[in-house]
Image: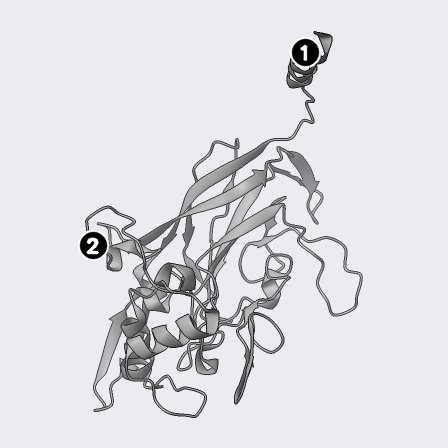
């Protein structure tokens, strides 16, 4: 009799135990906003016709980090606090609490596109081929140097190399009806245009540790500045003019390694210290949050606007 009644008693006892470790871990959500200027550039067609294009394909990966605070004077823009400098010529670490991205640097299945594609920016594979061939005037080519003229060819290359059968597994293009309008189109990309002309995207800091570390910091002039801690700082890695390459991508020895006959290359992925040393990667043409957001609680839903263009 006791053999069969002991187990539920033990289970009930363990289920009643609770250890409060003092951790606040939540999925924290918010919105990133870009002015149309951040995705607008002049282009010249094959016929020599100049035009200005505003297009979400000009939005590179957006990096979001949460830090102990931000300050002026380190960079030409507000920048996270840094720790001690241990190596000459190498800036101190920002020691982020965590972070996320809006759009990932994706494996693009042909070497030509390594470090040039961000997920959530292209409706389909035809949009990729069209963007590089007709807008950037730099057509996508295969490993033999032959121009890829159709999105179906590029899609099939991904299916073959990754041994998959759906766009959802490639995760470069729009593959689901996010907004529920019955179609998969521009409205299902990461960034969508608002009525005021700005572009917005939702983000989630998954299982993020939240810290309320308010403190007073002594400035160089002897005055005290109060910081609330847990500050959201973000920036957009703008694709390089002409090539579309992303400066935060390591395509030399990182990412998916394709190693088949006459087709050897790495697919590329973000450098590991992008959030720890963002100043090393932020360069002319990138857009930074001019007013980083200071959290008051883990339930805040910030709107972070990347409204400062880096010009030096």
Q: Earlier in the sequence, mark 2 or mark 1?
A: 1
Q: Residue 270 at what x, y percent from top left?
A: 56, 65
Q: Which labelled disc corresponds to residue 183?
A: 2
- Find disc 1 in the rendering and name its residue: 9
Residue 198 shows up from this direction: no
Residue at 45% x, 88% y: name it.
Answer: 143
Residue positioned 25% across, 74% down in the render: 52
Answer left or right for 54 relative to 34: left
Q: Residue at x 37, y 92 (%)?
A: 146
**Left or right side of 73 for 241:** left
- Around disc 2, counting alpha carbons within 10 Å, would you say few (fewer than 14), some (14 to 19), or many (20 or more)? few
Task: Measuring from the top left, give residue 304's x and y in whole percent.
Answer: 43, 47
Q: Is residue 83 above or below residue 285?
A: above
Task: Give the residue at the far top of this rendering.
Answer: 1
Residue 135 at what x, y percent from top left?
29, 80
State the separation of the CA atoms marked 2 and 1.
Answer: 54 Å
Image side of residue 176 versus residue 300, left or right: left
Quarter holding the N terminus? Answer: top right
Q: Nearer the viewer, residue 251 or 30?
A: 251
Point out residue 78 in the picture as x, y percentages from the top left corner: 55, 54
């Amino acid at each position: 009799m006791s053999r069969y009644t002991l187990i539920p008693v033990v289970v009930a006892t363990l289920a009643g135990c609770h250890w409060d470790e003092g951790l606040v871990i939540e999925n924290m959500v918010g919105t990133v906003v870009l002015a149309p200027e951040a995705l607008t550039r002049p282009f010249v067609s094959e016929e020599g016709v100049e035009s200005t294009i505003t297009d979400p394909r000009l939005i590179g990966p957006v990096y979001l980090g949460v830090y102990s605070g931000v300050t002026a004077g380190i960079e030409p823009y507000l920048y996270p606090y840094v720790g001690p400098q241990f190596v000459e010529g190498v800036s101190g670490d920002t020691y982020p609490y965590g972070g996320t991205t809006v759009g990932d640097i994706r494996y693009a299945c042909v070497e030509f596109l390594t470090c040039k594609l961000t997920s959530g920016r292209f409706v389909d594979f035809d949009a990729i081929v069209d963007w590089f061939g007709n807008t950037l005037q730099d057509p996508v080519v295969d490993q033999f140097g032959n121009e890829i003229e159709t999105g179906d060819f590029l899609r099939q290359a991904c299916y073959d190399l990754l041994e998959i059968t759906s766009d959802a597994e490639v995760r470069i293009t729009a593959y689901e009806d996010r907004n529920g309008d019955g179609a998969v189109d521009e409205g299902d990309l990461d960034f969508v245009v608002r009525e005021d002309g700005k572009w917005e995207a939702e983000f989630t800091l998954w299982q993020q540790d939240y810290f309320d570390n308010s403190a007073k910091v002594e400035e160089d002039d002897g005055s005290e500045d109060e910081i609330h801690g847990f500050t959201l700082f973000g920036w957009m890695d703008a694709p390089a003019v002409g090539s579309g390459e992303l400066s935060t991508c390591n395509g030399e020895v990182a990412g998916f390694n394709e190693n088949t006959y006459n087709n050897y290359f790495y697919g590329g992925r973000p450098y590991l210290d992008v959030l720890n040393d963002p100043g090393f990667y932020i360069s002319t043409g990138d857009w930074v949050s001019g007013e980083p957001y200071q959290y008051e609680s883990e339930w805040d839903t910030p709107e972070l606007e990347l409204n400062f263009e880096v010009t030096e």
